[in-house]
Image (spheres, rainbow, N blue to C red):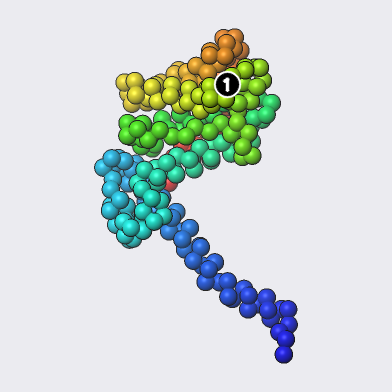
Amino acid sequence: MTKQPREEAILEKEFDKPSQQLLHTSASRRDAIMRASIHLFLEQGYSNTTVRQIAQATDTSPSLIIYHFGSKQAIAQAFLKAKMQELRSELLQLVDIRTEPELFCCTFVRLFQTIMSSPALCRFYHDMIEEGLFREFFFSSNDGINASMLILSKRNVKLPPDIANFYTHYIIPSVEMALWLSADTGVPGDEKLDIPFRALMGLICVPTEEVDATCAHGREIVRRLLEEKPELASYD
């Protein structure tokens, strides 16, 4: 006797339940590992935290930590990427990356550094820099549009592909890293947070007055955003 469609659907759902539960468990475990790792990084420093300590904090094994992330470094990088995605999503609601790529780029540079300068995260980020964990720096929207590439196109800057890639992916993070390494207090002062963006604008000869106006606008956007959502600068 042939099963009715409704009965088949019920059986199919029951058959899939173990795999769905497995996926959910795996995702939950990965999230638990991430959260425990970051809490340890913030409390005792990245360098002082071991994979074994992370395993103990999550009641798992070091091999399971490696299975989910590959390395302690990968956990830290995953956290930075997730934080950048969170901030980028917030900023995309306030600035149109297509029509105002300069403002998006400038504001994102300031926003990210302001967040990393917060008491909760500054030690961790400085550890990342001192450990040489050079992060990827994204100015892209969720559909992959890159703000710095849009700036070069808007300004009609003609560069060979390798030089364009250097301009858009290395100049700003390199300047930012230099700022953090040279800061006497461990984090750059507020007046220095625009320097990475200004470095890029200086290379393509954008008038100082225009750059000043963009930086002032970006500073105001960051101020308002953090007033409305102070939780962005914390990690619970």
Nearest the eye: 178 or 106: 178
- On the rendered structure, is 93 left or right of 192? right
- Residue drawn at x 43%, y 34% as measured from the top left: 135
- The residue singled out by tag 1 in the image is 160
Q: Residue furthest left?
A: 48
- On the rendered structure, is 223 left or right of 133? right
- Residue drawn at x 63%, y 78% as measured from the top left: 11
- Vertical relation: 203 (above or below) 218: above
In which image quadrant can residue 150 be found?
top right
Q: Amino acid at mark 1?
A: Pro
In which image quadrant can residue 89 be found?
top right
Nearest the eye: 188 or 78: 78
In the rendered image, the quadrant that contains the N terminus is bottom right
**Residue 139 horizontal/vertical position (percent):** 56, 31
Nearest the eye: 55 or 223: 55
- Vertical relation: 142 (above or below) 13: above
- Residue drawn at x 33%, y 43% as measured from the top left: 41
| SS class, disc 1 | loop
**Residue 233 horizontal/vertical position (percent):** 46, 36
- Vertical relation: 168 (above or below) 141: above
Would you call the spot at circle 1 few (<14 residues within 10 Å), some (14-19), or many (20 or more)?
few
Q: Residue furthest bottom?
A: 1
- Residue drawn at x 41%, y 55% as measured from the top left: 68
Whether residue 116 can be seen here = yes
**Residue 171 horizontal/vertical position (percent):** 48, 22
Whether residue 110 can be seen here = no
**Residue 222 horizontal/vertical position (percent):** 54, 28
